[in-house]
Image (spheres, rainbow, N blue to C red):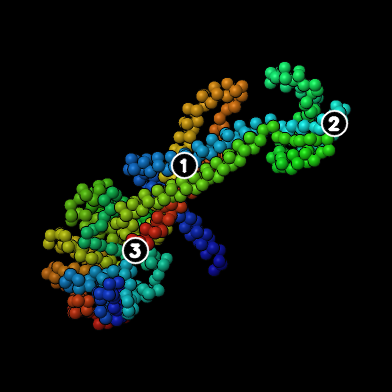
Amino acid sequence: MIRFTDVFMQYPGGQEALKRINLFIEQGAMAFVTGRSGAGKTSLLRLIALIERQSRGQIIVNGQNLERVTGRRVPLYRRNIGFMFQDHRLLNDRNVFDNVALPLVVAGYRYQEIRRRVHAALDKVGLLSREKQLPVALSGGEQQRVGIARAVVHRPALLLADEPTGNLDPALSWECMQLFKQFNQVGVTVLIASHDLGMIQKLKKRIITLRDGRLLTNIGQTLSEE
Amino acid sequence: MSTKPKSRRSRHSLSRMFNVWLSQHGQAFFSSLGDFFRSPVSSLLLTAVIGISLALPTAFYLILDNAQRVMDTWQGSVRIALYLKPSVSEEQARTLAGTLEEDAAVESVRFISREEALQEYRQMSGFDDVLEALEENPLPPVLVITPGFDSLASGGEAMLDRLNNLEQVDMAQYDSRWIKRLLAILEILQRGVLILSALLAVAVALIIGNSIRLTINNRRTEIEVNKLFGATNAFVQRPFLYSGLIHGVGGGLLAWILVAAALMLLDTPIERLAGLYHSDFRLHGLHWREFGLLLLAGAVLGISGSWLAVQRQLRELDLF
């Protein structure tokens, strides 16, 4: 699903965020990217999301060489990915329904289809009854679950989450991870950046550790590439 | 398999694409309209600025237009006085009047004989005694020519030259050169209004652009999230362009209302003034054409202003 070959990444200032990353994550896998702040977790996700571009090396996602995904192809490429953020980034002037519907509206779905899918996604995260409320009326954990619903409502092949549990207490974090696991079980490839090592280890999934922009360990790496 | 089902499917997907396009435009339009009413104060302030900026050149245009109309009615009364040489007899003068009347450039000719002229002069000037003292009538016979309107507009000077060169003519003269001068001044003013309009148009575009720029900054998160979930640039820009359009058209509408209100206020005093001059002149107001032009100007300025801001700002935000 995701393959990094000798990937380097440099920010405009000249600071190197990633150094010779070689990585393979197979279709339908669930993996964690961990490491200290500034180790390059976010940079890794930003490369996959095409928010940033690598300075060297090759990245292939879902069979597409990202170097060739430019211009008008970028939006189409992104419609196959779901995003989650630590600060949830819900739009505060829209209610829960409209927030979750955003990826579908962007892709131009019909209203009936949008309603059906948004309701299904909200049902999944247990917030169907809150659809008319504004995000500020929800608790932190609920807001994050709205974020999850938004990230999966368009049934992406890949789910990227950057510190999704950073602001949640352990119980809520665990709940959140269980949701990710459920999505993974129905075939979504899930890649989560997190520094909550204790919880990650309990989940018994592959852990990719970064330190100073280098790949450190690769516990549980699938050797059977392709 | 025949190709029929495939072509039907592609037609189907084309119509689906059109429906998506239409519904996305509808969505963008109504969300922009909703934003307009969600923050009514700033929206109305912006609309007011645009409206006043558009109303000013419109008002100047109307003033000039009306001045032109007044001048046109005066131009109908522009005449050429043809002072004939004293040696020309009354009979010769009448023959000349006859030939001139045939001329296409001439509408009518009136002959004033020396005696008539003297009488008229006596009445008008009050120099009765002085004239009595003169031994003979000092006044030449005169032909008063009313030129055709077209010939005056196109070649008034050429016509004057032609008349001056006639054998029997001592001197040909406009009796109202000042109208010509006034027309020239009007023309300068017209240019001035044109320049002013252009400047105000640029100002309107800049004002709209600036407000759109601020809106874009305020809605940065929304733009980011939209782009992250695969919104095209067109999708991101659309609500801002519609917002510019709505404010522009609103400003045009307001300009029309302002000018129409000013006209209503001016109508009665102008009617009274015209009555004093025994004229049935009425202010020539805004018609459907001007109304349409105002809305169009607002729309064009709104869209171009917001388009510029959107291009610049989205690039500056550098949203991947």
State which quadrant residue B106 falls in.
Answer: top right
* Front in this rendered view, residue B128 or B235: B128
Neighbour class for label 1 at 10 Å: few (<14), some, many (≥20)?
A: many
Secondary structure type for disc 1: helix
Placement of the C terminus of chain B among the 4 image quadrants:
bottom left
Q: CA distance from mark 1 to mark 3?
A: 34 Å
Residue at point 55%, 66% (across, down): B3
Chain name for mark 3: B
Q: Position of residue B130 (x, y in %)?
A: 72, 20
For residue B318, the mark is 3
Mark 1 or mark 3, earlier in chain: 1
Relative to residue A18, is residue B112 depicted above or below? Answer: above
Q: Amino acid at mark 1?
A: Leu
Q: Is residue B152 left or right of residue B212?
A: right
Residue identifier under label 1: B54
Q: What amino acid type should be assigned to the residue bearing mark 3?
A: Asp
Among the two numbered marks 1 and 2 on one chain, the one whose residue lies closer to the N terminus: 1
Task: Please name the residue that numbered disc 2 is placed on.
Answer: B87
Query: Which residue is at a point 32% across and 59% down the rendered structure image?
Result: B224
Q: CA distance from mark 2 to mark 3?
A: 90 Å
Is residue A12 among what the camera can see?
A: yes
